[in-house]
Amino acid sequence: MKKTIVVLLACALLGGMLSACGGAYTPGGQNVSRDTEQMIATAALPAGTAEGRTLRGALGVPERVEETLPTRMEKFSIQIAADVSVPDTDHLSVYRVSAAEFSEDFVAKAFDYLCKGETMYDYSNLFKTKDWIQGQINSMQRDLDMNDSPDDPSGGDAWRADYEAEIAELKLELANARDDLGDPLTEAKLSMEETAGNGKQEKFEAVNTPNMPCTVEFYVRNNVNDPTDEVRYIERTNTTVAPRSEAGLYYNDHRRVGSEWYQLRDVTNEASIAELKTTPQEALEQVAAILKTLGMEQMNPLRVVLAGDAAGADAKNYIYGVEVCRVVDGVEVRSPYSRTYVGGLDGGYEWAYETFEVLLDDEGIIGLNWTSPLTVGSVEVERANLLPFASILTVAKNMLGVVNEPLETDLKEYQSVSIKIDHITLSLQRIPNADSIQDGLLVPVWNFYGQEHFILSDGQEENRGNDLAVSLRQEPYLSINAIDGSVINKTLGY
Protein backbone atom coordinates (compact mmCIF):
# COMPACT_ATOMS: atom_id res chain seq x y z
CA MET A 1 0.00 0.00 0.00
CA LYS A 2 1.36 3.40 -0.92
CA LYS A 3 1.84 5.94 1.84
CA THR A 4 1.04 9.61 1.39
CA ILE A 5 3.66 12.27 1.78
CA VAL A 6 2.25 13.22 5.17
CA VAL A 7 2.90 9.81 6.66
CA LEU A 8 6.15 9.24 8.48
CA LEU A 9 8.17 6.55 6.75
CA ALA A 10 11.31 4.67 7.64
CA CYS A 11 12.95 4.90 4.17
CA ALA A 12 14.55 1.58 3.35
CA LEU A 13 18.08 2.01 2.03
CA LEU A 14 20.17 -0.74 0.48
CA GLY A 15 21.91 -3.13 2.80
CA GLY A 16 23.12 -2.22 6.27
CA MET A 17 21.93 1.15 7.46
CA LEU A 18 22.14 2.85 10.84
CA SER A 19 19.55 0.41 12.13
CA ALA A 20 22.09 -2.35 11.65
CA CYS A 21 24.27 -0.88 14.40
CA GLY A 22 23.91 -2.66 17.69
CA GLY A 23 24.61 0.43 19.78
CA ALA A 24 26.48 3.70 19.78
CA TYR A 25 30.05 3.69 18.47
CA THR A 26 33.11 5.71 19.37
CA PRO A 27 36.15 6.22 17.10
CA GLY A 28 37.85 3.42 18.99
CA GLY A 29 34.92 1.09 18.51
CA GLN A 30 33.81 1.09 22.16
CA ASN A 31 30.12 1.24 22.96
CA VAL A 32 29.01 4.35 24.83
CA SER A 33 26.74 4.10 27.85
CA ARG A 34 23.16 5.14 27.39
CA ASP A 35 23.32 6.93 30.75
CA THR A 36 22.15 10.46 30.00
CA GLU A 37 23.47 11.64 33.37
CA GLN A 38 26.94 10.64 32.19
CA MET A 39 26.23 12.56 28.99
CA ILE A 40 25.53 15.67 31.06
CA ALA A 41 28.74 15.19 33.03
CA THR A 42 30.76 14.81 29.84
CA ALA A 43 29.17 17.85 28.26
CA ALA A 44 29.90 19.94 31.34
CA LEU A 45 33.66 19.35 31.31
CA PRO A 46 35.73 22.55 30.95
CA ALA A 47 34.66 23.96 27.61
CA GLY A 48 37.17 24.38 24.82
CA THR A 49 35.27 27.23 23.21
CA ALA A 50 35.56 30.81 24.31
CA GLU A 51 32.58 33.09 24.73
CA GLY A 52 32.11 35.53 21.89
CA ARG A 53 33.75 33.22 19.36
CA THR A 54 31.46 31.59 16.80
CA LEU A 55 31.04 27.83 16.86
CA ARG A 56 32.42 27.58 13.36
CA GLY A 57 35.62 29.27 14.41
CA ALA A 58 35.89 27.63 17.83
CA LEU A 59 35.39 24.11 16.46
CA GLY A 60 37.40 24.67 13.28
CA VAL A 61 34.47 23.96 10.97
CA PRO A 62 35.14 24.58 7.26
CA GLU A 63 32.48 25.92 4.93
CA ARG A 64 32.79 22.78 2.77
CA VAL A 65 34.26 19.29 2.94
CA GLU A 66 35.58 17.34 -0.06
CA GLU A 67 36.67 13.76 0.64
CA THR A 68 36.66 10.40 -1.17
CA LEU A 69 36.52 7.62 1.39
CA PRO A 70 38.10 4.19 1.11
CA THR A 71 35.66 1.28 1.28
CA ARG A 72 36.06 -2.46 1.73
CA MET A 73 33.96 -3.39 -1.32
CA GLU A 74 35.00 -2.70 -4.90
CA LYS A 75 31.47 -1.87 -6.13
CA PHE A 76 30.67 0.41 -3.18
CA SER A 77 31.94 3.96 -2.86
CA ILE A 78 31.39 6.99 -0.63
CA GLN A 79 32.18 10.57 -1.45
CA ILE A 80 31.77 13.68 0.67
CA ALA A 81 31.17 16.90 -1.28
CA ALA A 82 29.18 18.79 1.30
CA ASP A 83 28.47 22.26 2.59
CA VAL A 84 28.65 22.35 6.39
CA SER A 85 25.94 24.22 8.34
CA VAL A 86 26.59 25.43 11.88
CA PRO A 87 24.25 27.47 14.11
CA ASP A 88 25.18 31.15 14.24
CA THR A 89 26.03 31.20 17.94
CA ASP A 90 29.04 30.86 20.20
CA HIS A 91 27.75 27.85 22.13
CA LEU A 92 25.18 25.05 22.24
CA SER A 93 23.35 23.83 25.33
CA VAL A 94 21.96 20.52 26.56
CA TYR A 95 18.28 20.53 27.58
CA ARG A 96 15.90 18.25 29.39
CA VAL A 97 13.05 17.20 27.10
CA SER A 98 9.88 15.14 27.45
CA ALA A 99 6.98 13.92 25.36
CA ALA A 100 4.10 16.39 25.30
CA GLU A 101 0.39 16.15 24.56
CA PHE A 102 -1.99 18.60 22.94
CA SER A 103 -3.97 20.78 25.31
CA GLU A 104 -7.70 21.09 24.75
CA ASP A 105 -7.28 24.85 24.31
CA PHE A 106 -4.79 24.36 21.49
CA VAL A 107 -6.95 21.67 19.85
CA ALA A 108 -9.94 24.04 19.92
CA LYS A 109 -7.86 26.85 18.43
CA ALA A 110 -6.46 24.65 15.65
CA PHE A 111 -9.92 23.21 14.89
CA ASP A 112 -11.49 26.67 14.62
CA TYR A 113 -8.69 27.89 12.35
CA LEU A 114 -8.28 24.89 10.05
CA CYS A 115 -11.94 23.86 9.76
CA LYS A 116 -13.49 27.33 9.66
CA GLY A 117 -16.49 27.36 7.31
CA GLU A 118 -16.76 23.55 7.28
CA THR A 119 -19.63 21.54 8.76
CA MET A 120 -17.83 18.91 10.80
CA TYR A 121 -19.24 15.81 12.50
CA ASP A 122 -18.06 13.33 15.10
CA TYR A 123 -16.03 10.71 13.23
CA SER A 124 -17.30 7.89 15.45
CA ASN A 125 -20.85 8.56 14.23
CA LEU A 126 -19.83 7.19 10.83
CA PHE A 127 -20.06 3.72 12.38
CA LYS A 128 -23.43 4.29 14.04
CA THR A 129 -25.56 5.03 10.99
CA LYS A 130 -28.09 2.60 9.52
CA ASP A 131 -26.24 2.57 6.21
CA TRP A 132 -22.93 1.56 7.80
CA ILE A 133 -24.43 -1.09 10.07
CA GLN A 134 -26.49 -2.56 7.23
CA GLY A 135 -23.35 -2.66 5.09
CA GLN A 136 -21.55 -4.63 7.78
CA ILE A 137 -24.45 -7.08 8.04
CA ASN A 138 -24.55 -7.53 4.27
CA SER A 139 -20.80 -8.12 4.08
CA MET A 140 -20.75 -10.72 6.85
CA GLN A 141 -23.86 -12.47 5.51
CA ARG A 142 -22.21 -12.63 2.07
CA ASP A 143 -19.19 -14.36 3.63
CA LEU A 144 -21.51 -16.85 5.36
CA ASP A 145 -23.41 -17.57 2.14
CA MET A 146 -20.18 -18.16 0.23
CA ASN A 147 -18.53 -20.00 3.15
CA ASP A 148 -15.66 -17.49 2.87
CA SER A 149 -13.77 -17.97 6.14
CA PRO A 150 -11.69 -14.98 7.34
CA ASP A 151 -9.15 -17.49 8.67
CA ASP A 152 -7.41 -20.55 7.32
CA PRO A 153 -10.04 -22.65 5.46
CA SER A 154 -8.81 -25.71 7.36
CA GLY A 155 -9.71 -24.02 10.65
CA GLY A 156 -13.22 -25.44 10.69
CA ASP A 157 -16.62 -23.76 11.00
CA ALA A 158 -16.23 -22.03 14.38
CA TRP A 159 -16.09 -18.67 12.61
CA ARG A 160 -19.64 -19.12 11.32
CA ALA A 161 -21.10 -19.09 14.82
CA ASP A 162 -19.08 -15.97 15.65
CA TYR A 163 -20.37 -14.24 12.52
CA GLU A 164 -23.96 -15.20 13.19
CA ALA A 165 -23.73 -13.90 16.76
CA GLU A 166 -22.20 -10.62 15.57
CA ILE A 167 -24.86 -10.21 12.87
CA ALA A 168 -27.54 -10.67 15.55
CA GLU A 169 -25.93 -7.91 17.64
CA LEU A 170 -25.70 -5.61 14.62
CA LYS A 171 -29.38 -6.14 13.84
CA LEU A 172 -30.25 -5.02 17.36
CA GLU A 173 -28.11 -1.89 16.84
CA LEU A 174 -29.74 -1.31 13.45
CA ALA A 175 -33.19 -0.99 14.99
CA ASN A 176 -32.14 2.11 16.93
CA ALA A 177 -29.45 3.42 14.59
CA ARG A 178 -29.41 6.99 13.34
CA ASP A 179 -30.01 7.96 9.71
CA ASP A 180 -27.33 10.66 9.64
CA LEU A 181 -24.19 11.81 11.44
CA GLY A 182 -26.11 13.71 14.09
CA ASP A 183 -25.61 17.33 15.02
CA PRO A 184 -22.58 19.22 13.66
CA LEU A 185 -19.73 19.83 16.08
CA THR A 186 -19.57 23.34 17.47
CA GLU A 187 -16.35 22.93 19.48
CA ALA A 188 -13.44 20.57 19.91
CA LYS A 189 -13.51 18.51 23.10
CA LEU A 190 -11.05 15.78 23.98
CA SER A 191 -12.46 12.49 25.25
CA MET A 192 -10.79 9.44 26.76
CA GLU A 193 -11.23 5.95 25.32
CA GLU A 194 -9.92 2.53 26.24
CA THR A 195 -7.75 0.76 23.70
CA ALA A 196 -6.36 -2.75 23.37
CA GLY A 197 -4.75 -4.28 26.45
CA ASN A 198 -5.90 -1.82 29.12
CA GLY A 199 -4.49 1.06 27.13
CA LYS A 200 -5.95 4.56 27.11
CA GLN A 201 -6.06 7.29 24.50
CA GLU A 202 -7.39 10.82 24.57
CA LYS A 203 -8.79 11.93 21.23
CA PHE A 204 -10.92 14.26 19.13
CA GLU A 205 -11.95 13.15 15.63
CA ALA A 206 -14.04 15.11 13.15
CA VAL A 207 -15.01 14.69 9.49
CA ASN A 208 -17.21 16.64 7.09
CA THR A 209 -18.97 13.87 5.16
CA PRO A 210 -21.06 10.76 5.86
CA ASN A 211 -19.13 8.73 3.28
CA MET A 212 -15.67 7.20 3.28
CA PRO A 213 -13.16 8.35 2.37
CA CYS A 214 -13.77 11.66 4.10
CA THR A 215 -12.82 14.79 2.20
CA VAL A 216 -11.91 16.92 5.24
CA GLU A 217 -10.42 15.27 8.33
CA PHE A 218 -9.29 16.67 11.66
CA TYR A 219 -7.92 14.15 14.13
CA VAL A 220 -6.11 14.64 17.44
CA ARG A 221 -4.77 11.80 19.56
CA ASN A 222 -2.97 12.09 22.86
CA ASN A 223 -1.20 9.02 24.13
CA VAL A 224 -1.71 7.70 27.64
CA ASN A 225 -0.53 4.08 27.62
CA ASP A 226 -1.54 3.74 24.00
CA PRO A 227 -2.30 1.24 22.62
CA THR A 228 -1.59 -0.82 25.75
CA ASP A 229 -0.16 -0.42 29.23
CA GLU A 230 2.46 -3.16 28.69
CA VAL A 231 3.68 -5.48 25.95
CA ARG A 232 0.76 -7.76 25.10
CA TYR A 233 -0.18 -10.33 22.50
CA ILE A 234 -3.66 -9.64 21.09
CA GLU A 235 -5.01 -13.01 19.96
CA ARG A 236 -7.96 -11.57 18.06
CA THR A 237 -5.67 -9.67 15.68
CA ASN A 238 -2.64 -11.98 16.02
CA THR A 239 -0.40 -9.02 16.84
CA THR A 240 1.94 -7.98 19.62
CA VAL A 241 1.49 -4.42 20.87
CA ALA A 242 3.56 -2.27 23.22
CA PRO A 243 3.18 1.18 24.80
CA ARG A 244 3.81 4.00 22.34
CA SER A 245 4.37 7.73 22.79
CA GLU A 246 3.09 9.37 19.63
CA ALA A 247 0.59 12.16 20.13
CA GLY A 248 -0.60 13.55 16.81
CA LEU A 249 -2.67 16.31 15.22
CA TYR A 250 -3.72 15.72 11.61
CA TYR A 251 -5.71 17.93 9.25
CA ASN A 252 -6.19 17.05 5.60
CA ASP A 253 -8.45 18.39 2.85
CA HIS A 254 -8.65 15.91 -0.03
CA ARG A 255 -11.13 17.81 -2.21
CA ARG A 256 -8.82 19.88 -4.39
CA VAL A 257 -6.13 17.31 -4.92
CA GLY A 258 -5.47 13.62 -4.39
CA SER A 259 -4.37 12.01 -1.16
CA GLU A 260 -1.12 10.36 -2.33
CA TRP A 261 1.93 12.52 -2.93
CA TYR A 262 5.40 11.88 -4.27
CA GLN A 263 8.32 14.11 -3.40
CA LEU A 264 9.79 15.40 -6.66
CA ARG A 265 12.54 17.81 -5.61
CA ASP A 266 13.67 20.28 -2.97
CA VAL A 267 12.78 23.80 -4.15
CA THR A 268 13.71 25.76 -1.03
CA ASN A 269 16.24 27.93 -2.84
CA GLU A 270 14.38 28.30 -6.16
CA ALA A 271 13.01 31.77 -6.92
CA SER A 272 9.99 30.35 -8.76
CA ILE A 273 8.82 27.11 -10.32
CA ALA A 274 6.74 26.30 -13.41
CA GLU A 275 4.37 23.92 -11.63
CA LEU A 276 2.80 26.41 -9.18
CA LYS A 277 2.13 30.14 -9.20
CA THR A 278 3.04 30.46 -5.54
CA THR A 279 6.81 30.72 -5.13
CA PRO A 280 8.70 28.55 -2.65
CA GLN A 281 9.49 31.64 -0.58
CA GLU A 282 5.80 32.59 -0.48
CA ALA A 283 4.99 29.04 0.65
CA LEU A 284 7.47 29.38 3.51
CA GLU A 285 5.97 32.75 4.46
CA GLN A 286 2.43 31.34 4.42
CA VAL A 287 3.45 28.54 6.76
CA ALA A 288 5.21 31.01 9.06
CA ALA A 289 1.96 33.02 9.21
CA ILE A 290 -0.05 29.88 10.08
CA LEU A 291 2.36 29.03 12.89
CA LYS A 292 2.12 32.56 14.26
CA THR A 293 -1.70 32.51 14.17
CA LEU A 294 -1.72 29.24 16.11
CA GLY A 295 0.72 30.65 18.67
CA MET A 296 3.57 28.34 17.70
CA GLU A 297 6.52 30.73 17.65
CA GLN A 298 8.81 27.89 18.76
CA MET A 299 8.33 26.19 15.36
CA ASN A 300 9.95 27.46 12.13
CA PRO A 301 9.61 26.46 8.46
CA LEU A 302 12.77 24.59 7.50
CA ARG A 303 12.52 23.71 3.82
CA VAL A 304 10.00 23.28 1.02
CA VAL A 305 9.69 20.46 -1.51
CA LEU A 306 7.59 20.11 -4.64
CA ALA A 307 5.33 17.06 -4.61
CA GLY A 308 3.15 15.57 -7.34
CA ASP A 309 0.22 13.17 -7.47
CA ALA A 310 2.40 10.72 -9.41
CA ALA A 311 6.12 10.08 -9.70
CA GLY A 312 8.31 12.15 -11.99
CA ALA A 313 6.93 13.42 -15.30
CA ASP A 314 3.64 11.54 -14.80
CA ALA A 315 2.48 14.06 -12.17
CA LYS A 316 -0.47 16.24 -13.20
CA ASN A 317 -1.20 18.06 -9.95
CA TYR A 318 1.33 19.66 -7.66
CA ILE A 319 1.56 20.89 -4.09
CA TYR A 320 4.22 22.20 -1.77
CA GLY A 321 5.28 20.24 1.27
CA VAL A 322 6.87 22.43 3.93
CA GLU A 323 8.91 20.78 6.65
CA VAL A 324 8.68 22.56 9.99
CA CYS A 325 11.10 22.06 12.87
CA ARG A 326 11.31 23.12 16.50
CA VAL A 327 13.81 25.87 17.30
CA VAL A 328 15.30 26.15 20.79
CA ASP A 329 17.27 29.30 21.57
CA GLY A 330 17.78 29.84 17.86
CA VAL A 331 18.99 26.27 17.17
CA GLU A 332 17.06 23.76 15.04
CA VAL A 333 15.93 20.42 16.46
CA ARG A 334 16.23 17.75 13.76
CA SER A 335 14.34 14.44 13.59
CA PRO A 336 16.55 11.83 11.93
CA TYR A 337 14.17 8.86 11.83
CA SER A 338 10.59 7.80 12.44
CA ARG A 339 10.88 6.64 16.07
CA THR A 340 13.10 5.10 18.68
CA TYR A 341 12.48 1.68 20.17
CA VAL A 342 13.04 0.19 23.61
CA GLY A 343 13.21 -3.59 23.42
CA GLY A 344 13.59 -4.02 19.67
CA LEU A 345 11.62 -3.29 16.52
CA ASP A 346 9.13 -6.10 17.18
CA GLY A 347 7.09 -5.58 20.32
CA GLY A 348 9.30 -2.75 21.57
CA TYR A 349 8.16 0.41 23.32
CA GLU A 350 8.08 3.27 20.78
CA TRP A 351 8.71 7.02 20.99
CA ALA A 352 8.13 8.85 17.71
CA TYR A 353 10.44 11.70 16.78
CA GLU A 354 8.75 15.07 16.49
CA THR A 355 7.78 15.88 12.90
CA PHE A 356 5.65 18.69 11.51
CA GLU A 357 4.55 19.09 7.88
CA VAL A 358 2.29 21.58 6.13
CA LEU A 359 0.87 20.93 2.65
CA LEU A 360 -0.42 23.74 0.46
CA ASP A 361 -1.11 24.70 -3.14
CA ASP A 362 -1.96 27.94 -4.94
CA GLU A 363 -5.31 28.13 -3.12
CA GLY A 364 -3.92 27.68 0.36
CA ILE A 365 -3.42 25.04 3.04
CA ILE A 366 -4.58 21.48 2.40
CA GLY A 367 -2.80 19.62 5.17
CA LEU A 368 -1.13 20.08 8.56
CA ASN A 369 0.31 17.11 10.38
CA TRP A 370 2.17 17.35 13.70
CA THR A 371 3.44 14.22 15.42
CA SER A 372 4.99 13.73 18.85
CA PRO A 373 5.30 17.30 20.21
CA LEU A 374 7.96 17.98 22.81
CA THR A 375 8.17 19.92 26.04
CA VAL A 376 11.61 21.50 26.38
CA GLY A 377 12.54 21.75 30.04
CA SER A 378 15.53 22.99 31.98
CA VAL A 379 18.97 23.73 30.62
CA GLU A 380 21.26 21.02 31.99
CA VAL A 381 24.49 22.33 30.48
CA GLU A 382 24.62 25.96 29.38
CA ARG A 383 27.82 25.70 27.33
CA ALA A 384 28.32 22.12 26.14
CA ASN A 385 31.87 20.96 25.57
CA LEU A 386 31.96 19.93 21.89
CA LEU A 387 34.62 17.98 20.05
CA PRO A 388 36.57 19.80 17.31
CA PHE A 389 35.13 19.21 13.84
CA ALA A 390 38.35 17.45 12.79
CA SER A 391 37.58 14.72 15.34
CA ILE A 392 34.00 14.45 14.09
CA LEU A 393 35.19 14.16 10.50
CA THR A 394 37.61 11.39 11.49
CA VAL A 395 34.70 9.43 12.99
CA ALA A 396 32.65 10.03 9.85
CA LYS A 397 35.39 8.84 7.52
CA ASN A 398 35.87 5.69 9.61
CA MET A 399 32.20 4.91 10.13
CA LEU A 400 30.23 5.98 7.03
CA GLY A 401 31.35 2.84 5.21
CA VAL A 402 30.84 0.57 8.24
CA VAL A 403 27.33 1.80 8.94
CA ASN A 404 26.10 1.93 5.33
CA GLU A 405 27.93 -0.95 3.67
CA PRO A 406 25.53 -3.05 1.56
CA LEU A 407 25.38 -6.81 1.60
CA GLU A 408 27.35 -8.70 -1.05
CA THR A 409 24.13 -10.33 -2.27
CA ASP A 410 22.52 -6.91 -2.77
CA LEU A 411 25.38 -5.78 -5.02
CA LYS A 412 25.14 -8.63 -7.54
CA GLU A 413 22.72 -6.89 -9.90
CA TYR A 414 24.60 -3.57 -9.85
CA GLN A 415 27.69 -2.26 -11.54
CA SER A 416 28.16 0.09 -8.61
CA VAL A 417 26.46 1.60 -5.58
CA SER A 418 27.61 4.97 -4.30
CA ILE A 419 26.70 7.38 -1.51
CA LYS A 420 27.35 11.08 -2.00
CA ILE A 421 27.16 13.15 1.17
CA ASP A 422 26.03 16.61 0.03
CA HIS A 423 25.35 18.48 3.30
CA ILE A 424 26.39 18.23 6.92
CA THR A 425 24.54 19.94 9.77
CA LEU A 426 25.06 20.63 13.46
CA SER A 427 21.75 20.83 15.30
CA LEU A 428 19.97 19.58 18.40
CA GLN A 429 18.57 16.05 18.51
CA ARG A 430 16.48 14.11 20.99
CA ILE A 431 18.19 11.29 22.88
CA PRO A 432 15.94 9.23 25.21
CA ASN A 433 16.76 8.32 28.76
CA ALA A 434 17.47 4.64 29.31
CA ASP A 435 14.34 2.54 28.67
CA SER A 436 12.17 5.67 28.38
CA ILE A 437 9.63 6.69 25.77
CA GLN A 438 8.78 9.96 27.50
CA ASP A 439 11.95 11.64 28.81
CA GLY A 440 15.40 12.44 27.51
CA LEU A 441 17.79 15.17 26.43
CA LEU A 442 18.30 17.51 23.51
CA VAL A 443 21.99 17.28 22.63
CA PRO A 444 24.15 18.70 19.82
CA VAL A 445 24.48 16.20 16.95
CA TRP A 446 26.24 16.21 13.58
CA ASN A 447 24.14 14.71 10.74
CA PHE A 448 25.50 13.67 7.36
CA TYR A 449 22.89 13.79 4.59
CA GLY A 450 23.13 12.81 0.95
CA GLN A 451 21.97 10.65 -1.94
CA GLU A 452 22.44 7.02 -2.89
CA HIS A 453 23.04 6.06 -6.53
CA PHE A 454 22.52 2.58 -7.99
CA ILE A 455 24.13 1.88 -11.38
CA LEU A 456 22.85 -1.20 -13.21
CA SER A 457 25.05 -3.58 -15.18
CA ASP A 458 24.18 -1.75 -18.43
CA GLY A 459 25.46 1.54 -17.03
CA GLN A 460 22.01 3.08 -16.47
CA GLU A 461 21.07 4.47 -13.08
CA GLU A 462 18.17 2.73 -11.40
CA ASN A 463 15.40 5.15 -10.46
CA ARG A 464 14.94 3.71 -6.98
CA GLY A 465 11.93 4.80 -4.95
CA ASN A 466 10.26 6.77 -7.74
CA ASP A 467 7.16 4.62 -7.44
CA LEU A 468 6.89 5.15 -3.69
CA ALA A 469 5.68 8.14 -1.78
CA VAL A 470 8.14 9.56 0.71
CA SER A 471 8.20 11.67 3.83
CA LEU A 472 9.46 15.22 4.03
CA ARG A 473 11.92 14.18 6.70
CA GLN A 474 15.48 13.67 5.50
CA GLU A 475 17.27 10.68 6.99
CA PRO A 476 21.00 11.03 7.60
CA TYR A 477 23.51 8.41 6.55
CA LEU A 478 25.34 9.04 9.79
CA SER A 479 24.58 10.82 13.07
CA ILE A 480 27.44 11.66 15.46
CA ASN A 481 27.08 12.95 18.99
CA ALA A 482 28.96 16.27 19.01
CA ILE A 483 29.89 15.86 22.68
CA ASP A 484 31.54 12.44 22.78
CA GLY A 485 31.90 11.45 19.10
CA SER A 486 29.68 8.37 19.39
CA VAL A 487 27.71 7.22 16.37
CA ILE A 488 24.00 7.32 17.14
CA ASN A 489 21.93 4.27 16.27
CA LYS A 490 18.80 5.75 14.72
CA THR A 491 16.43 3.03 15.94
CA LEU A 492 17.73 3.17 19.51
CA GLY A 493 18.16 6.94 19.45
CA TYR A 494 21.53 7.07 21.26
Image (cartoon, rainbow, N blue to C red):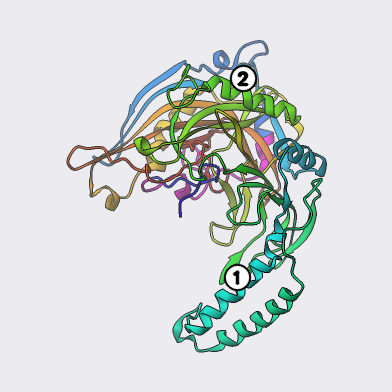
Quarter of the picture holding the C terminus:
top right
Q: Report the disc number at residue 135.
A: 1
Residue 241 percent coordinates (x, y): 62, 64
Determine which of the numbered discs, if any, sits on residue 48 in the image.
2
Assess whether residue 20 is covered by the magenta stretch: yes
Farthest residue to the top: give it. 52
Residue 184, percent from left and from top: 77, 51
Q: Which amino acid type is marked by label 1?
A: Gly
- Whole-angstrom CA distance, mark 2 to mark 1, is 69 Å
Question: Mark 2: few, some, or many residues within 10 Å (few <14, many ≥20)?
Answer: some
Q: Height in image: 472 above or below 195?
A: above
Q: Is residue 222 visible?
A: no
| Residue positioned 62% across, 21% down in the render | 285
Magenta residue span: 14-40
Q: Which residue is located at x 36 percent, y 48 percent? A: 15
Which SS type dominates the magenta stretch? loop
Mark positioned earlier in the residue sequence (2 or 1): 2
Which one is closest to the eye, mark 2 or mark 1? 1
